[in-house]
């Protein structure tokens, strides 16, 4: 009996995962106009990304101030910050185009995007390691002490921290 709940949960998860592409890719009914707030959502999206870039620049400025870089370290800083800039993203297909893909084509496109995102993360990681090697031990400690960016983590979003394991 102890293993039935996980099996049922796994089965429900698989069924839900298989149903998601069909539910998420339903084309809008013919003649349906865009929602009233569609244009406003695009403006919010632009503001958010502008705010994100500004926030990233502020974090980098604060890090640079904490590290007290020497003139000899400035080229390493410039290379590091350049490497941290977001890479060019491929154009995403619109909903109509996406709906024309078969499920295997969608899977292949999602796989290609994951590969590209992983390559970008690897590039940023290597740039960080190269910059870190140019720092003094004291600067490395300051770099290590900086707050980590943890998207989606409850503590990062102001939510409750994970509970400690029961003993």
Image (cartoon, helix red, strand yellow):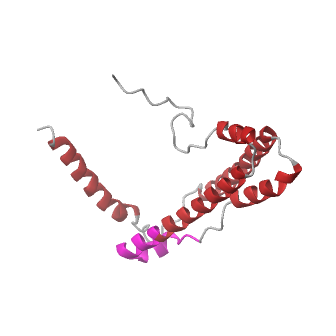
Q: Which SS does the magenta portion mostly show?
A: helix
Where residue 102 appears, x then y in whole percent? Answer: 37, 76
Where residue 158 appears, x then y in whole percent? Answer: 57, 32
Q: Residue furthest right?
A: 71
Q: Is residue 14 above or below residue 96?
A: above
Q: Residue at x 61, y 41 (%)?
A: 148
Q: Quadrant of residue 66?
A: top right
108 or 93: which is nearer to us?
108
Q: Residue at x 48, y 71 (%)?
A: 112
Q: Is residue 92 magenta?
A: yes
Q: Quadrant of the C terminus?
A: top left
146 or 29: which is nearer to us?
146
Q: Residue furthest front?
A: 137
67 or 34: which is nearer to us?
67
Q: Which residues are magenta?
A: 91-111
Q: Is residue 152 left or right of residue 139?
A: left
Q: Residue furthest left?
A: 1
Q: Is residue 125 above or below residue 119?
A: above
Q: Quadrant of the N terminus?
A: top left
Q: Is residue 155 above or below residue 124?
A: above
67 or 156: which is nearer to us?
67
Q: How many marks?
A: 0
Q: Is residue 3 magenta?
A: no
Q: Residue at x 56, y 65 (%)?
A: 119
Q: Residue at x 74, y 41 (%)?
A: 139
Where residue 61 appears, x then y in whole percent? Answer: 79, 45
Where residue 8 appears, x then y in whole percent? Answer: 19, 47
């Amino acid at each position: 009996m102890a293993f039935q709940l996980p099996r049922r949960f796994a089965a429900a998860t698989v069924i839900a995962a298989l149903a998601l592409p069909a539910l998420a890719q339903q084309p809008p009914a013919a003649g349906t106009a865009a929602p009233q707030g569609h244009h406003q959502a695009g403006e919010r999206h632009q503001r958010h990304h502008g705010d994100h870039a500004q926030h990233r620049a502020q974090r980098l400025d604060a890090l640079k101030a904490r590290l007290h870089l020497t003139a000899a370290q400035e080229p390493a800083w410039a290379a590091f910050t350049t490497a941290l800039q977001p890479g060019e993203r491929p154009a995403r297909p619109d909903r109509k185009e996406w709906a024309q893909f078969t499920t295997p084509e969608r899977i292949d496109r999602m796989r290609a995007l994951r590969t590209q995102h992983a390559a970008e993360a690897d590039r940023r990681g290597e740039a960080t390691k190269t910059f870190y090697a140019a720092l003094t031990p004291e600067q490395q400690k300051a770099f290590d002490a900086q707050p980590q960016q943890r998207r989606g983590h409850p503590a990062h979003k102001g939510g409750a921290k994970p509970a400690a394991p029961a003993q």
